[in-house]
Amino acid sequence: MIFESFYLACLSHASYLIGSEGVAAVVDPQRDVKIYEDFAAEHGLKIQHIIETHLRADFVSGHRELADRTGAKIYLGHRAGATFAHVPVHDGDQITFGRCKLRFLETPGHTMESISVLVTDLDKGPEPSAVLTGDTLFIGDVGRPDLSADKTPQELAAMLYTSLQTKLLPLADTVEVYPAHGAGSMCGRRLSEERVSTIGKERAGNYALQARSQDEFVKLLTAELPERPGYFALDAEINRAGAPALEALPPLRALSPADVMAEVTKGAVLLDVRPTDQFSGAHISGSLHISLSGQFAFWAGSLLGLDARLILIAENAEQVEAARLRLSRVGLDGTMGFLDEGITAWINAGHDVVRLPQITAPELARMMREEPGTFNVLDVRRSGEWKEGHLPGATFRPLDQLSKHLSDLDRARPSVVHCKSGYRSAIACSLLERAGLREVINLVGGYDAWLALQLPVETTAVPAQ
């Protein structure tokens, strides 16, 4: 049996291909599906089965396009209400091909239609050796229980507890666990960097599985849930119908500076995807900066919404294509074009650019000692990060909520912005600039740089937002 995992770091997403005797199944495919076709062709496999462990909310799946290209059947939990042709899966249903057997378990809780897939390699024996858990069980965590329009988080958490206790935890300790996400995903809170675990390891070490009762589990899981990104519900509906093929998207237009200015007056958003040091050195006033180097697509979807009409500012054609693809993976299909020849063309056309000032941790520490109260220090990390420690006197403004909480900022003072390492704070600085704040400064290296110098920190509760 062939078992291959595909990890998409920018979405912290894992998908899988299982093959045996010329037949393959793909589980939880990403939107750009050619990687599965290429792998199957290389190993003499024909993709005949496509399995979705649930309707994804954090990205757009390629299930429909992959089915159209291969003729494969799509399998999905019977509660999904999907409108495309599919096989509705019930508990105990199974697929057998070659020497591989896949058995489905209904494991609702993250979503109502969630399923897990038991994998048995018949050449090794009659018992399952692995389970693909989707977003039900992660390594170190479990799925968030607030993605239903009809059920409360408490109701879903209770279902998740039952799914874990009656379907997954009774499996043998040695059964390997392959989830659909790793660290960085917003589908959980404490996901591990590890890509594979075992039922025994998770039973012993997963914090969520230490709850001694259903009530304790529900309280643990529903306390301080991170806010659900707005695009999650939209992506789930796209996946319920099946997304159009990527090749159906219109080609991008190469835009002159004059074209860009005209489109901006019509509501287009300038999205600068260059590295932060380049954005800091020179950028177009009012542009939003999200570097390709991090969780680019997640933050674009969270901050822009899926209806945004985008013009890309990049340093080369490769960055343009990468940005377009990664945006489409979360359903942002409204990228209309790019600034031809980038920021150089803008400058050569005689248009002004602005820069983003930077400050180092030692410089900030000195200013805080010598000039206390002369500037705002904004911490744009998440609540769990804030609770573990933050700069003295900092104001908590998580990035995903920043635009909603600007009215009480003292605009007469400069604002120094930081996150963990500098990626999110650079995004935040561009948001503040777009909102009209004139003196915005990015802390180089973020909280990590502050800690590395053993500078003072404090711990306080997360303030109400």
Image (cartoon, rainbow, N blue to C red):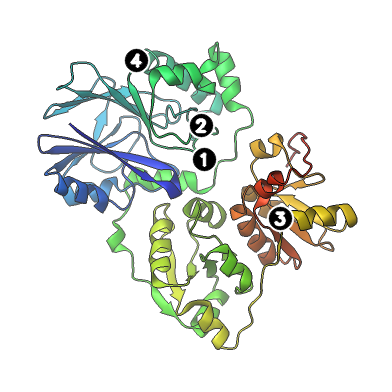
Q: Left or right of 359: which side holds 200?
A: left
Residue 116: which quarter of the image? Answer: top left
Whole-percent x, y for residue 367 in the image: 84, 57
Under tag 3, what secondary structure? strand
Under tag 4, what secondary structure? loop
Q: Residue type at mark 4?
A: Leu
Q: Is the Cβ of the residue at disc 3 closer than 8 Å to that at disc 1? A: no
Residue at the (27%, 28%) spot, across then down? 89
Residue carrying label 3: 417
Residue carrying label 1: 186
| Rendered image: mark on residue 64 | none
Q: Earlier in the sequence, mark 2 or mark 3?
A: 2
Q: Is the Cβ of the residue at disc 1 closer than 8 Å to that at disc 2? A: yes
Q: What whole-number distance in Å separates the C-alpha atoms at marks 4 and 1?
A: 27 Å
Residue 281: which quarter of the image? Answer: bottom right
Whole-percent x, y for residue 142 in the image: 48, 27
Q: What whole-number distance in Å separates the C-alpha atoms at marks 3 and 4?
A: 47 Å
Q: What whole-number distance in Å separates the C-alpha atoms at marks 4 and 2?
A: 22 Å
Nearer to us of marks 2 and 3 is 3
Under tag 1, what secondary structure? loop
Packing grade of label 1 (10 A; few <14, some 14-19, many >=20) is: many
235 or 393, which lies in front?
A: 393
Residue carrying label 2: 144
